[in-house]
Image (cartoon, grey):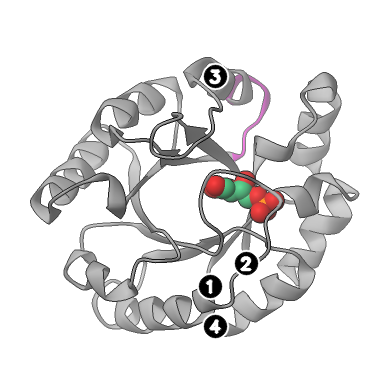
Amino acid sequence: MIVSPSVLSLDYSRFPQQIDELNKSGAQWLHFDVMDGHFVPNLTFGPDILKAFVRTSPLYKDVHLMVTDPAFFADVFLKAGADLVTFHYEAMDNKAKMKELAAHIHEAGGKAGIAIKPATDAAVLKDLLKDFDLFLVMSVNPGFGGQKFMPLALDKIHTLRTWLNDVNPDALVEVDGGINAQTGAQCAQAGVDVLVAGSYVFKNDITTAVRSLQK
Ligand SMILES: O=C(CO)[C@@H](O)[C@H](O)COP(=O)(O)O
Ligand SMILES: [Fe+2]
């Protein structure tokens, strides 16, 4: 299981200690929630914050764009050091543009992911399965950390993992929102590959929480 702690919940007044703990925790990825105040009613990081993590952590940089202009911000965050850029299905109005942006991310040397909100059916992704490296199932409405896990994500994880096993077995399924040891185990059972966890990791001992998700 890949664990991707969401640095939205990190205590920035203790950045050096927290990054040191994350680096030693056994987590493989770090998750960056980029919110623009338009696609979601909240504002978070620009690229300079990602650059600070690139300088201080070898972990894989998993960037989750919650923005209305993913094509613009994909380039901004790739240049800042993102390894994977995931944008929302709901932020674009046609699939040709989504495929084009995935190809552009690949040309820039990154991996491409696509995310769906809780209200979006997994079926919309059926003709995009070969174009992306990662499929992100949101288990809360995007915008804020600390919300309750929505069990409707479990069916979507199972469905996507089953479809991908046939046509793109190397692609990953990621879940994000309300993940703790219990909901993480339910998602693992449904076939998820990557668990994002924010408040659960940072409100507890970081290493203990990460290890409990890897079990
Ligand atoms: O994308 C988001 C929220 O929009 C997430 O990545 C949250 O940061 C997860 O936080 P928790 O639900 O784990 O506290
Ligand atoms: Fe996220």
Left or right of 35? Residue 17 is right
Question: Which numbered dot is residue 1?
Answer: 2
Q: N-terminal of the two: label 1 or label 3?
A: 3
SS category of the residue bearing label 1: loop
Q: Quadrant of residue 42?
A: top right
Q: CA distance from mark 1 to mark 2?
A: 8 Å
Please say if the residues under marks 1 and 2 sit with CB atoms less than 8 Å apart. yes
Which residue, given by chain and number where applicable, does mark 1 sit on? 192
Extreme-top residue of the structure: 48
Mark 1 and mark 3: Cα distance apart in space: 29 Å
Labels 3 and 2: the sequence-earlier one: 2
Nearest the eye: 147 or 209: 147
Kindly report the distance in space between the C-alpha atoms of the residues bearing marks 4 and 3.
Answer: 34 Å
x, y percent for residue 109: 30, 36
Disc number at residue 190? 4
Callout 2 environment at 10 Å: few (<14), some (14 to 19), or many (20+)?
Answer: some
Q: How many marks?
A: 4
Q: Is residue 94 left or right of residue 58?
A: left
* Residue type highlighted by circle 3: Lys
Is residue 170 positioned above or below 151 on the image?
A: above
First of labels 4, 3 by sequence position: 3
Q: Are marks 4 and 1 in contact (CB under 8 Å)?
A: yes
Q: Which segment is the magenta one?
A: 54-59
Residue 75 horizontal/vertical position (percent): 30, 26
> Where residue 129 sits: x, y (%)?
24, 67
Question: Residue at left 36%, top 67%?
Answer: 170
